């Protein structure tokens, strides 16, 4: 490409024929996008494999890996808020490429999930068709913005070659167990413990190094018994567990997919707790490492705090309370208060409730404990129905009315032998802790309130502070009422010492042990949907899972006529999942030879959650054409390996929304750590540095009925807003289709050009800060680029305005100050302040006269503009006489000699009023500045002796008389 684009048509008589307009920008942008695509301008060379290129201009250069949280390709396409982070990382990558780095910047698509499936159900269109159409639309929109991606590396989680490796990673997890005693695997701050292959666990059992649960020799166990024991250790396992069942969607949901008010984040349907058989991931085994390794990450502190809180590590003790149906185990962070435990509370779903509940009420059962029911069974059943209608959040909240019923059973407090009643109540959750608590009303406000309602004993075990006259005392103090005939006494001990003493006693007497627990639950990994990755699992006649061999991957989704899971009345909790895949009987019932001859098997009919592909996609970008491994170790180590001892490794910069603080980021960290433990990757963490971009916000307008009206059709008159001459109300918040305030990048590119849109979004404020969208303000970015264009191109003739004459001293010094400042801003991702500096320089050059622009200014100006407005920069770079792309041109460097300020002007105040000015050498000392200032205001002083002369270096001199 040697020619340059010119504007020959005149749209209006007053517009110069060679002005940089939207029409000219569109032609320039399309031409340069074609140029980049044809030449693979932004390809990044790998060390090894098909994507290696020893002749690349950055082969062997220091690497930089930058990734964006990839989008879900919805049918509505992008609005102007979506590409904010993409443009930011593109500007940063273009700059880094120009300072000599080998920059990898890929983009892919998180394309499995519920929205495509729901659309398929509604329209009868296969979700693959709509997904691929949406992906193609996104690709077109992203290309239009001039984003410099290495397109060879683009992936979609729905591509069979991609999800083949998702299934392979699942098998690595399935075929692993977590050994808390293994050393050398953590690699970060989290301490000992790591995943090991299941084969090593089996070898331990076979050799007797690890005893079986009941002590029998491994060789005496049946095949089913052995498999059951092994399955209980796997990092991916099938469990009958409390799950979030959503009848309205016909699927179960992870805790993170349920909103704070107990509804599905997709569709806003009610969610209920049910015990169902599901695939789980043992993420809790990694709780300590997931917390500990946060310390080494360059992440925003609020995101780290959200992960710590979600994992919710607590230290204390497990205590067993004997009952007729077996021990009830509780976890408490205050085992020192166990003498004050006057009743137990179980979650209504607790596994021992049915066994504990007798047929009749015990003698002397208080009426308030029964809930008005004739038998304990009736009371418990009714209360379970009551609790099932409430969300976990509602149950955990401090409700004013405390509810519950007596199970009819008693437990024994192990420290004093007291018989204490066992209740069920909704404020205890089956999925948190052990699903049971010891209630110590003297030290817990909720327990006190419950005890008051149900007339239960209250025993203080901590001496309240002097003057305390409340109810439950939650502070520290010496133990009281805490001794027993069993030679155990905590009385007089402070909290820390009492904790140590009671844990020692519990362990010595077989009543419990010190423990660490987590708020984090194991990850629910099954979805009753069609549009997701099939599990590489089959079941034999025993009903136990069997992993398919790697050579049978990928397990592809079958073609089905009905994509929808069976949905129910959203409020009907007593329903069961029925998956779309279960109806594809020819696919489900299959004959396979798994090494012991052909046999009949049943496939898993659930699919993986949408999060599966996003747990590892940053690794596939490194080696997307590799069909022998999910990534070549040499490529992973080059792009993501640790740089030094103690470094976690990972993507150098990861940019995305803060809404993924727990879901995606926590899951991806878990998968990555398993892969690290098994030796598949050298990096301990997937993302070394994280930045959360802000949001584009916009005004929306509602009419008198509360309906949203098109924002672009609203006009303002005298501070009031009107649509079709009717007044409307204005509100401020997110941009969205339902709010009818969406502005698309397509519209902006058509109206102003992609470069103008890019400059506007980057100039609106810091990348991490949300900002309001104002289409009218985009014209400011357009005028800036028009001035840059005029610096080099005569708008009347189209000829070059660049001259080989030197710049004046003031312009030259400003140029180098701007170069120095822009470099610092680009390193710190302060794009808005970098653009402000470029505007200052451009204004100086355009206001310097009509004799032309010195090349020594024009050349570095174009190079500095190119990360923000790459198309017009390429065009101007060509007009400067360069044959090669500006993408690999050297970014300007400031001359240190021109950054020095030769002199400084000080205003001189006398009693607070400026009475003169002085100009002194920039390195003049305070004494010299003081003497010069006194000379300058000598007439004002008129012989008076100053009381003070204050010099503010580089700013001012204040004389007080």
Image: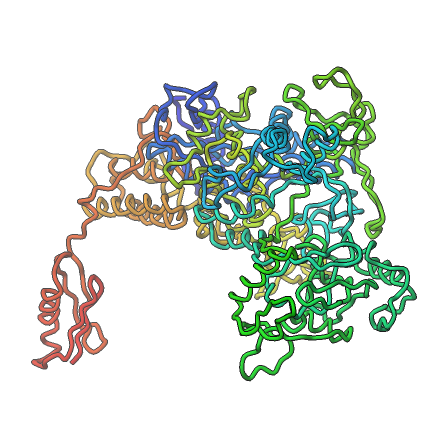
- In the displayed structure, 467 sits above or below 598; it is below
**The quarter of the displayed image where residue 95 is located:** top left
* Viewport quadrant of the N terminus: top left
Left or right side of 527 for 178: left
Q: Which of 532 and 478 is in front in this view?
A: 478
* Viewport quadrant of the C terminus: bottom left
Left or right side of 711 for 240: right
Q: Which of 239 and 440 is in front in this view?
A: 440
**The quarter of the displayed image where residue 404 is located:** bottom right
> In the orientation shown, which residue stands out farthest toward the left?
943
Q: Please tell me which residue is depicted at 67% across the width and 56% down the height of the picture.
A: 260
Left or right side of 289 for 135: right
Residue 331, horizontal then vertical, whole percent: 64, 58
> In the orientation shown, which residue stands out farthest toward the right?
374
Residue 507 in sight in this render: yes
Q: Which of 798 and 766 is in front in this view?
A: 766
Residue 663, horizontal then vertical, whole percent: 60, 46
Q: Please tell me which residue is depicted at 48% across the width and 41% down the height of the picture.
A: 654
- In the displayed structure, 191 sits above or below 451; it is above
Numbered marks: total: 0
Q: Nearer the viewer, residue 595 or 295?
A: 595
> In the orientation shown, which residue stands out farthest toward the top?
597
Residue 785, horizontal then vertical, whole percent: 40, 42
Residue 438, horizontal then vertical, whole percent: 69, 63
Q: Please tell me which residue is depicted at 90% across the width and 63% down the height of the picture.
A: 360
Residue 9 in sight in this render: no
């Amino acid at each position: 490409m040697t020619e340059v684009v010119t504007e020959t048509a005149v749209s209006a008589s007053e517009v110069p024929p060679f002005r940089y307009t939207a029409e000219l920008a569109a032609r320039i942008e399309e031409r340069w996008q074609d140029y980049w695509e044809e030449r693979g301008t932004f390809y990044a060379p790998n060390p090894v494999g098909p994507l290696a290129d020893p002749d690349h201009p950055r082969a062997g250069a220091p690497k930089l890996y930058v990734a964006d949280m990839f989008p879900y390709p919805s049918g509505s396409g992008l609005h102007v808020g979506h590409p904010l982070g993409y443009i930011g990382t593109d500007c940063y990558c273009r700059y880094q490429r120009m300072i000599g780095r080998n920059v990898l910047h890929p983009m892919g698509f998180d394309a499995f999930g519920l929205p495509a499936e729901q659309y398929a159900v509604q329209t009868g269109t296969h979700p693959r068709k709509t997904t691929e159409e949406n992906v193609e639309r996104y690709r077109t929109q992203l290309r239009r913005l001039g984003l410099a991606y290495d397109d060879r590396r683009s992936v979609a989680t729905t591509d069979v070659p991609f999800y083949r490796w998702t299934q392979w990673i699942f098998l690595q997890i399935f075929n692993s167990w977590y050994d808390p005693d293994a050393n050398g695997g953590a690699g970060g701050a989290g301490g000992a413990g790591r995943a090991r292959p299941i084969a090593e666990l089996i070898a331990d059992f076979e050799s007797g190094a690890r005893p079986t649960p009941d002590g029998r020799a491994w060789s005496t166990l049946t095949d089913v018994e052995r498999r059951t024991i092994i399955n209980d250790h796997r990092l991916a396992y099938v469990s009958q567990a409390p799950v979030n069942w959503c009848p309205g969607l016909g699927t179960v949901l992870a805790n993170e997919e349920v909103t704070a008010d107990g509804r599905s984040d997709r569709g806003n349907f009610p969610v209920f707790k049910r015990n169902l058989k599901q695939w789980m991931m043992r993420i809790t085994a990694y709780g300590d490492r997931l917390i500990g390794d946060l310390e080494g990450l360059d992440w925003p502190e609020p995101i780290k705090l959200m992960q710590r809180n979600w994992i919710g590590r607590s230290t204390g003790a497990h205590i067993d309370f004997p009952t007729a149906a077996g021990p009830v185990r509780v976890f408490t962070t205050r085992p020192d208060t166990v003498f004050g435990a006057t009743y137990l509370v179980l979650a209504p779903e607790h596994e021992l409730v049915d066994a504990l509940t007798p047929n009749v009420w015990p003698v002397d059962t208080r009426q308030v404990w029964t809930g008005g029911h004739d038998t304990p069974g009736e009371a418990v059943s009714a209360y379970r129905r009551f609790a099932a209608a409430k969300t976990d959040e509602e149950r955990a909240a401090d409700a004013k009315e405390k509810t519950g019923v007596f199970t009819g059973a008693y437990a024994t407090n192990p420290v004093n032998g007291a018989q204490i009643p066992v209740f069920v109540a909704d404020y205890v959750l089956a999925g948190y802790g052990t699903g049971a608590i010891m209630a110590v009303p003297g030290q817990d406000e909720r327990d006190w309130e419950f005890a008051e309602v149900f007339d239960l004993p209250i025993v203080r075990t901590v001496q309240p502070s002097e003057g305390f006259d409340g109810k439950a005392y939650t502070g520290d103090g010496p133990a009281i009422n805490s001794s027993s005939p069993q030679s155990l006494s905590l009385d007089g001990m402070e909290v820390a010492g009492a904790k140590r003493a009671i844990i020692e006693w519990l362990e010595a007497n077989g009543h419990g042990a010190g423990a660490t627990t987590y708020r984090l639950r194991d990850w629910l990994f099954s979805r009753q949907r069609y549009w997701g990755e099939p599990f590489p699992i089959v079941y034999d006649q025993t009903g136990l899972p069997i992993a398919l061999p790697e050579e049978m991957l990928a397990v592809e989704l079958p073609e089905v006529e009905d994509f929808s899971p069976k949905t129910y009345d959203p409020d009907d909790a007593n329903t069961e999942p029925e998956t779309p895949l279960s109806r594809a009987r020819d696919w489900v019932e299959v004959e396979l030879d798994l090494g012991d001859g052909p046999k009949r098997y049943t496939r898993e009919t659930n699919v993986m959650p949408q999060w599966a592909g996003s747990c590892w996609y940053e690794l596939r970008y490194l080696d997307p054409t590799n069909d022998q491994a999910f990534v070549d170790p040499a490529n992973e180590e080059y792009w993501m390996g640790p740089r030094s001892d103690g470094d976690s490794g990972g993507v150098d910069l990861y940019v995305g929304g803060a809404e993924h603080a727990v879901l995606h980021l926590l899951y991806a960290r878990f998968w990555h750590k398993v892969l690290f433990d098994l030796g598949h990757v050298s990096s301990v963490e997937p993302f070394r540095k994280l930045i959360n971009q802000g949001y584009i916000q916009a005004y929306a307008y509602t009419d008198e009925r509360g309906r949203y009206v098109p924002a672009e059709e609203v006009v303002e008159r005298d501070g009031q807003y009107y649509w079709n001459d009717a007044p409307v109300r204005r509100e401020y918040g997110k941009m969205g289709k339902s709010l009818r305030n969406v502005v698309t990048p397509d519209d902006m590119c058509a109206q102003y050009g992609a470069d103008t849109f890019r400059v506007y979004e980057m100039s609106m404020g810091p990348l991490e800060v949300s900002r309001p969208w104002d289409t009218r303000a985009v014209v400011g970015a357009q005028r800036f680029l028009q001035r840059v264009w005029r610096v080099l191109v005569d708008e009347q003739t189209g000829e070059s305005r660049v001259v080989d004459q030197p710049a004046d001293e003031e312009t030259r010094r400003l140029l180098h100050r701007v170069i120095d400042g822009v470099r610092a801003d680009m390193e710190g991702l302060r794009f808005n302040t970098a653009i402000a500096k470029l505007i200052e320089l451009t204004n100086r050059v355009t206001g310097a006269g009509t004799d032309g622009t010195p090349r020594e200014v024009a050349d570095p100006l174009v190079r500095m503009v190119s990360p923000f407005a790459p198309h017009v920069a390429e065009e101007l770079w060509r007009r400067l006489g360069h044959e090669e792309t500006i993408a690999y041109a050297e970014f300007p460097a400031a001359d240190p000699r021109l950054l020095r300020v030769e002199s400084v002007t000080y205003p001189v105040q006398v009693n607070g009023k400026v009475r003169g000015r002085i100009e002194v050498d920039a390195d003049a000392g305070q004494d010299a500045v003081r003497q010069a200032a006194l000379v300058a205001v000598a007439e004002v002083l008129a012989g008076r002796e100053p009381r003070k002369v204050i010099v503010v270096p580089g700013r001012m001199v204040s004389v007080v008389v």
